[in-house]
């Protein structure tokens, strides 16, 4: 498939949906396949005498070590050790194949398309070669971590080892509370939003905030679906956050909506367990945090644009000053 062919050369991002008010429920959820681009300019080919090794005629390009937080590095370490079957401190291509074959969840964690498995060795060999910076057919922890260099944002939302159990809790509550008790959930949600806004000392009277409530509620099913695969919604949520920022939306109001939803479910639920409390609080907190990233990106872009405009204005002023001085010098020469 064309999507898999693109893995060899560059990061492929498919953003198939918009989480803004005009597209509350896209038919296909947005997705992201993020693979560290190869440092080589030529397509790698296997060594004839080493089936798991890769060869290339080009010289590797040095890459800076990703700037991981301790939490990010811990998550990468957990995935690395899951792949390192013989505990050698390195991961071979064979171990990567084996890990994918044994654990389909690993594909989602690594961001590798589900069909890029042992039946698609060429694609995985290309990915592996792009990571193997020293060409020894083994990935040490740092090389393995390069895979996540473009996915640190996704890493922060990946569930812990109890992810499957949490997913089950969320899906059960989604059906039994959010859907089946919608007539009760909606007014409870509105009441909880009002309480959160009052506690935060902010108001939300404009039309955008009315749309925000509908968007948050409608997209809950996508939040649940993407719990184990946050890359499905991260690009669209960041884009939505940037759009809200451009409309001068108060981030505190957004937070109030996302904090209110789990509390509304608690009011309506016939039985509310600690597992449900934890699962929904974390899910909505992560969803809000993705939107917050969009606000931060918008602020950074605005700052960069302002700085660029200031530089351009300064250059224009310098140019005008130089032209003025040149004109004065020419006038003096003419007078003499």
Image (tube, rainbow, N blue to C red):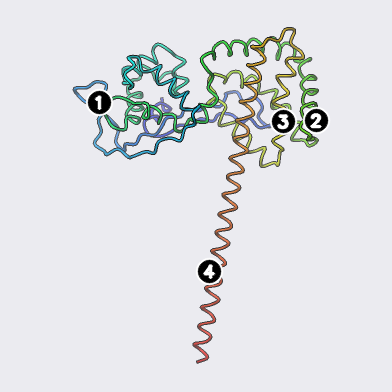
The nearer-to-camera label among 2 and 3 is: 2
Q: What crowding class fits label 1: few (fewer than 14 Cα within 10 Å), some (14-19), or many (20 or more)?
A: some
Could you tell me how far apart the alpha carbons at marks 1 and 3 are, in whole angstroms? 52 Å
In which image quadrant can residue 242 be found? top right
Residue 158 x %, y %: 53, 22
Dot 1 corresponds to which residue? 46
- Mark 2 or mark 1: which is in front? 2
Which circle, 3 or 4, is nearer the viewer? Answer: 4
Say which label, 2 or 3, has the lower sequence index: 2
Q: Please name the residue that numbered disc 4 is placed on.
A: 319
Q: Is residue 248 above or below residue 280?
A: below
The image quadrant of residue 66 is top left
Disc 2 + disc 3, Cβ < 8 Å: no
Residue 138 located left or right of residue 235: left
Disc 2 element: helix
Q: Are marks 2 and 1 in contact (CB under 8 Å)?
A: no
Mark 1 or mark 3: name the one nearer the start of the chain: 1
Quadrant for the N terminus in the image = top left
Give me the residue at 76% from left, 13% from top. 268
Q: Which residue is mark 3?
A: 212
N-terminal label among 2 and 4: 2
Marks 2 and 4, how far apart at CA: 53 Å
In the rendering, at what x and y percent does residue 310 appear?
58, 58
Going from N to C along the chain, the mark reached first, 3 or 4, is 3
Element at label 4: helix
Tally of numbered tags: 4
Q: Would residue 37 be found to the left or right of residue 273 on screen? A: left
Q: Secondary structure at mark 3?
A: helix
The disc placed on residue 198 is 2
**Residue at 57% in and 67% down:** 317
Q: Secondary structure at mark 1?
A: strand
Asked whether the viewer can see residue 119, the reply is no
């Amino acid at each position: 498939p064309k999507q898999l062919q693109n893995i060899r050369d560059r990061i492929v991002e498919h953003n198939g949906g918009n989480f803004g008010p005009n597209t509350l429920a896209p038919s296909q959820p947005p997705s992201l396949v993020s693979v560290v681009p190869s440092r080589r300019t030529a397509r790698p080919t296997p060594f004839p005498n080493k089936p798991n090794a890769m060869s290339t005629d080009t010289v590797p390009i040095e890459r800076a070590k990703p700037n991981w937080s301790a939490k990010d590095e811990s998550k990468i370490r957990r995935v690395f050790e899951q792949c390192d079957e013989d505990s050698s401190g390195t991961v071979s291509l064979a171990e990567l194949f084996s890990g994918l074959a044994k654990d389909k969840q690993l594909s989602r964690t690594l961001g590798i398309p589900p069909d890029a498995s042992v039946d698609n060795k060429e694609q995985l060999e290309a990915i592996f070669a792009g990571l193997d910076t020293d060409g020894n057919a083994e990935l040490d922890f740092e090389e393995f971590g390069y895979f996540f260099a473009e996915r640190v944002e996704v890493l922060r939302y990946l569930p812990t080892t109890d992810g499957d159990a949490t997913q089950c809790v969320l899906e059960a509550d989604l059906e039994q509370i959010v859907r089946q008790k919608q007539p009760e959930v909606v007014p409870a949600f509105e009441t909880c939003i009002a309480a959160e806004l009052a506690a935060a000392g902010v108001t939300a009277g404009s039309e955008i905030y009315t749309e925000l409530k509908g968007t948050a509620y409608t997209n809950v099913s996508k939040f649940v679906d993407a719990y184990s695969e946050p890359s499905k919604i991260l690009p669209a949520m960041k884009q939505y956050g940037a759009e809200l920022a451009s409309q001068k939306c108060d981030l505190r109001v957004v937070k109030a909506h996302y904090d209110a939803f789990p509390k509304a479910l608690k009011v309506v639920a016939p039985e509310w367990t600690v597992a449900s409390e934890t699962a929904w609080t974390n899910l909505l907190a992560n969803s809000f945090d993705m939107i917050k990233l969009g606000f931060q990106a918008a602020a950074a872009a605005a700052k960069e644009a302002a700085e660029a405009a200031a530089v351009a204005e300064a250059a224009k002023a310098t140019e005008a000053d130089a032209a003025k001085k040149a004109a004065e010098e020419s006038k003096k020469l003419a007078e003499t």
